[in-house]
Amino acid sequence: MKSILMTLALAVCFFSLAQNSGIKPGDQALFKECLNQEDPYFCTNESFKNLISKLITPTLTQEIKNSTYKDGLDISILFISDEQGKVMREDIEVYCENKNLQASARYLISKLPAFEPKSDKHLTRQSVHVYNLTFIPTPGYESYMLAPPLLTNKRIGYERLATYKNCEGDLHESQICFHKKVFEVIRKNVTLPETLVSYTDQINVFYLVNTDGSFILVDVVGGTQELHKETKKLKEDIKRAFTKIPPAQPALIRGIPTIQDFNLPVKTSMTIKNYSGN
């Protein structure tokens, strides 16, 4: 007889959203020109990052090349839009080692047109906008481009991360408790296959905790061909599991409920053991 042992291990980190975020108009302030796009939240984020990228002019590129931070320049931005979608200029925060880029970004944000605000179903209709960006040089330092999320330093963070009421303790302990609860729901509702192949594999589950504490599955990626062959219903199972996760307390910045995004790496280990018995 054969017995298959399956173990799941997890680690969690933040990620930069892929398209199809699942955030609907009304849950977060959005650029009005993005409202008719397939994913208005993704469109808003990408449009703003493009605006900041355009601030890296040839003159500024030369200035960066001659500086001590020529191999990478970080800029962290936080601003709030009010219940009418207007940027609250007194709450703009920009951190950047290059003071010219810092000043240009602050001015650009102060001149942004009004966003489409959150809907009135939210008790707090203000929206927090946070961007932690890193620019790295192209070959030959001819220009600077946005770095991948994993290379980005985060200077601005959350005052409170998404959590549950019974997850007490310091920030680290609270997050461990939170992630364990999320993982347990997935583990109970996802059936891994019985297979005669022994291997270790990993998939990455991208999800959000929305401003109302609800969970949104963004995508499931990764995994070997063997895993996908044996788990044709894997994505459907995980999607169904996410509908069973109880709402959490959303992340907060300045006391305002804020969208938080996660990458949940799920490692599957399958080992076949032979044993004798009746």
Image (spheres, rainbow, N blue to C red):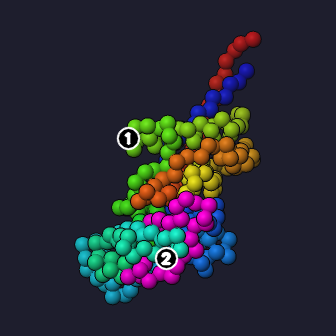
Image quadrant holding the N terminus, namely top right
Magenta residues span 107-130
x then y, percent, for residue 16: 51, 62
Report the front residue among 258 and 9: 258
Q: Quadrant of residue 202?
A: top right
Q: Where residue 41 is drawn, which disc sits there?
A: none
Q: Amino acid at mark 2?
A: Lys
SS assignment at label 1:
loop
x then y, percent, for residue 11: 49, 44
Provide the major secondary structure of the magenta segment.
Answer: loop
Residue 55 in the image: above or below residue 147 = below
- Reading the image, the residue beneath label 2 is 86
Q: Residue 23 in magenta?
A: no
The residue drawn where x is 32% and y is 80% is 103
Image quadrant holding the C terminus, namely top right
SS assignment at label 2:
loop
The residue drawn where x is 68% and y is 38% is 189
